[in-house]
Image: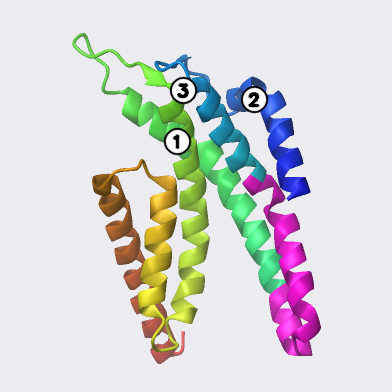
Amino acid sequence: MFSFLLSALIVWHFREEWLQLFCTLPLIYIHLYEAFFSFLELSLTSAFVVTTPYILYHILSFLTPGLYKYEFSNFISFGFTFTFLFFSLLILYFVYLLPTLVTFFSGFQSGLLTQSITLKDYIQFITLIISLAFFTLILPFLTFVIRVQGYRKFIYMFLSLMSALVTPPDVFSLIVTTIPTIILFEIATFVSLINRDTGT
């Protein structure tokens, strides 16, 4: 908790410089409190990302005394692999995917339409990119868990909860996010089962 709060405070102190790393567009805010809560969301999200390896290390340290040697090796491999892939995907998404999406969505401007991006919307967009990286990694892991019968309903609940955390507080956004995520999960599970049956 101390490392998380310290990271959040550091990001809050350099919030504008930190935001400029991901955004070169002019942003506005409408409501009086919008800038405060938007930067607070950015700080907390960034702190979570930065402290993920540290948190994962302490979780593994707590679990390893009760593990067999082969389970310990698997946990260590999973921790390093997950951390490496997570930050690699974040770099890939922010360097290539984020500018591409911004350019695409900004291309709808015309003589009739003028684009005005709020600070809140852009930070929520960044949070969505981070969530996309997380889901990209967690879905293959869940395909292995689903092979144990009876876990599908819990995975659905988990995906719904994660979707609720990264979407605006309305039912439509939750449904639009949750249904594609579940469909992707089922596709990944189907492909995983095919590969297992064919031995590839």
In the image, what residue type sits under mark 2?
Answer: Arg
The span picked out in magenta is: 48-76
The vertical placement of 110 against 48, above or below, is: above
The vertical placement of 164 against 126, above or below, is: below
Q: Could you tell me which residue is drawn at 47 percent across and 73 percent down? A: 142
* Residue 94 point in image, percent of width and height: 54, 38
Left or right? Give the position of 150 relative to 2.
left
Count the marks: how many?
3
Q: Name the residue at the left extreme.
A: 112
**Residue designated by label 1:** 124
Q: Nearer the viewer, mark 1 or mark 3?
A: 3
Left or right? Give the position of 16 relative to 173.
right
Callout 1 touching callout 3 (CB < 8 Å): no
* 10 Å crowding of disc 1: few (<14), some (14-19), many (20+): some
Callout 3 touching callout 2 (CB < 8 Å): no
Q: Quadrant of residue 106?
A: top left
